[in-house]
Image (tube, helix red, strand yellow):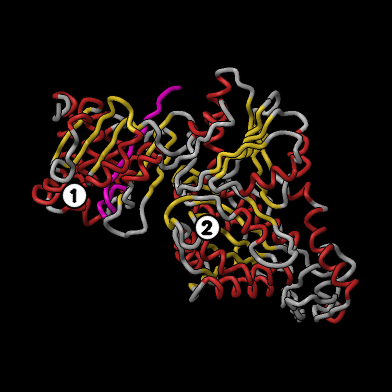
Amino acid sequence: MGFHYELRFAGVGGQGSLTAGTILAHAAVFHTNYYATQVPTYTSQVRGGAAKADIIISDTPIVFAESTNVDFFLATHQKAYDAYKGDLKKGADVLVDSGLVKVPDEDAKIYKIYEYPLVKVAKYEIGNVVTMNVLAVGICVGLTHVLDVEAVRETVKEEVPERFLDMNLKAFDMGLEVGEKFRREGPTKK
Amino acid sequence: MGRIAFLNANAAVAEAALVAGLGFYAGYPITPSSEVPERLSKIMPEKGLPFMMMEDEIASINACVGASASGVKAMTCTSGPGFSLKQEALGMACMFEVPLVVVDVMRGGPSTGLPTRPSQQDIMQARWGTHGDHPIIAVAPCNAQEAVFETIRAFNLAEKFRQPVVLLTDGSLSHLHTKIYIPDPDEVEIVDRAQPEVDPENYYPYDYNYEVPPLAKWWTEDGKSYRYHLSSLIHDKTGFPTVYPKYAQWLLERMHNKILNHRDEILKYEYYKMDDAETCIVAFGSTAEAARVAIDQAREEGIKVGMFRPLTIWPSPEEQIRDIASKVKQFIVAEMNLGQYKLEVERIVGGRAPVYGVSQAAGVLIRPSQIYDKIKDPSKRVEIGLTEEELKRFGGGE
């Protein structure tokens, strides 16, 4: 098998995990010439239920589209972390919101845990909590190099509403920087 | 040239319906099917086509039956609970013999069940949900691209056989976003219902001379107006009721035979690595994709296993399954329900080979690893479930 990468973006309904997944999948399909699938799962609660999007990016057609061997996991809520950590690969990159998710110590031995105050930074430093998903996409790309930065940046431009564009590009660049730093320095929770 | 888009299967079904010539949509939204009307509600008004958001599922399908009887291609879309409500009118559509496409995006049941989660629990409902000896066609695609072509095929079959067709997808497939190709109408076969060759005064909607009598449009382009009667009662060639026993028997047999005598045009199926297979997995829809991965893995270890995948669920591919039964040692039917299609396979196989099941109705996809484990040991239970210890501390919730 050539290139095959599985990502899972999980949060609670309303946080934007599904949008974040769509951005990466679109970047893979329309700007990188990969195959990609995105499967969202949510509960019947509009807000507050655990929600996830599984994204698979591959250089060959994807047959079974649910992630069963996750390379990168984003969790922005404890409920989502607990519910969806089951399919992670050993040594998977795990990005969590440090204010909302408490990662058990034993998990840090299996996965590479990166903690970052996503919500706080989106709300107070960037200026709007809705940018959190793009911030997370930036960190994901900076950390994993799963897709070309410019391909993802182009997709962000296409996907976010115009009036939020500057804010989101700022979030994306900030995320990239954080991601690259994580890549250099390794997990935050040892 | 068609176009390429990154869509989920619900949106793909909506786009494909328009390619097939959809002229009327009426529906009532329900998770996980709502992206179908959502997309159509944007596109259809722009094209000048009627889109009706109805007060409920019952009114929706009745509106579609009426629209179709007047001469346009009609579709409605729902999920399990809504499909239950539509059954009465679905039977009426079978009796009227009007073309109709009913999309059922299967979610966990019974009742309101698991609203956002996938299942394949409506297999038998698609066949026998409405009462009486009615004929039915049901098709089940396994991915978003196939959903495009199966939607078009569903319309074609409906038009050709004057018959309601059920398109079965599931809550996972319907939300699976992937790159798909949407063809232009001139790239695919589009069937329109046959029109009468006689003038309105000599026209009968159930003309005895046809296996599938032409269903006239109420008005034609050259200004003719065909007016006729449709009855949900047993009716004669005029469409008015009759109780003549010999005739009632003949009508029902004709309605079945118009489907069963044309299985070669209606059945669609796939053999996957079946040439030398000793174990045959039978799977359809999303589950078939999991089976494919499991089979590839088992084949790498030299296990002779393949898959028979019906795309047409009803009528059953009886001849094909019977033929496989004479060649393989065992069947494994994998489906997201407690063994509905397994019953049908058992009926057809008729004891010629053992039929095992991966019968999981948990609201999650059956995974390739589960099917792989079943291939390795068919007697083993592979469905997920609570252990006794888990049951003791299980507090519900997520």
Task: Give how far across and how far down residue A124 sits, in percent.
Answer: 9, 50
Q: Is residue A61 rendered to the left or right of residue A49?
A: right
User: Percent position (x, y) of residue B253?
Assistant: 84, 63
Q: Which residues are magenta?
A: A1-18
Residue at label 1?
A: A166
As rendered, which of B142 and B382 lies closer to the eye?
B382
Whether residue B104 is visible, yes or no, is yes
x and y percentages locating residue B34 in the rendered image = 45, 61
Please say if the residues under marks 1 and 2 sit with CB atoms less than 8 Å apart.
no
Q: CA distance from mark 1 to mark 2?
A: 34 Å
Q: Is residue B209 above or below residue A76?
A: below
| Residue at point 13%, 24% (across, down) | A185
- Mark 2 packing: few (<14 Cα in 10 Å), some, or many (20+)? many
Q: Looking at numbered disc 1 in the image, what kind of residue is underneath it?
A: Asp
Q: Secondary structure at mark 1?
A: helix
Q: Secondary structure at mark 2?
A: helix
Chain holding disc 2:
B
Please report, as a chain letter, where disc 1 is located. A
Where is mark 2, residue-wise?
A: B14
Direction from residue B121 to residue A80 in the image, left or right:
left
Q: Is residue A66 positioned above or below B299 on the image?
A: below
- Which residue is nearer to you in this view: A150 or B14? B14
Residue B200: in magenta span: no
**Residue toward you, B23 or A77:** A77
Query: What type is the residue that disc 2 sits on?
Result: Ala
The residue positioned farthest toward the left in the image shown: A124
Q: Is residue A12 magenta?
A: yes
Residue A170 seen in the current view: no
The correct choice, above or below, for A133 with respect to B115 in the image is above
Picture quadrant where residue A33 is located: top left
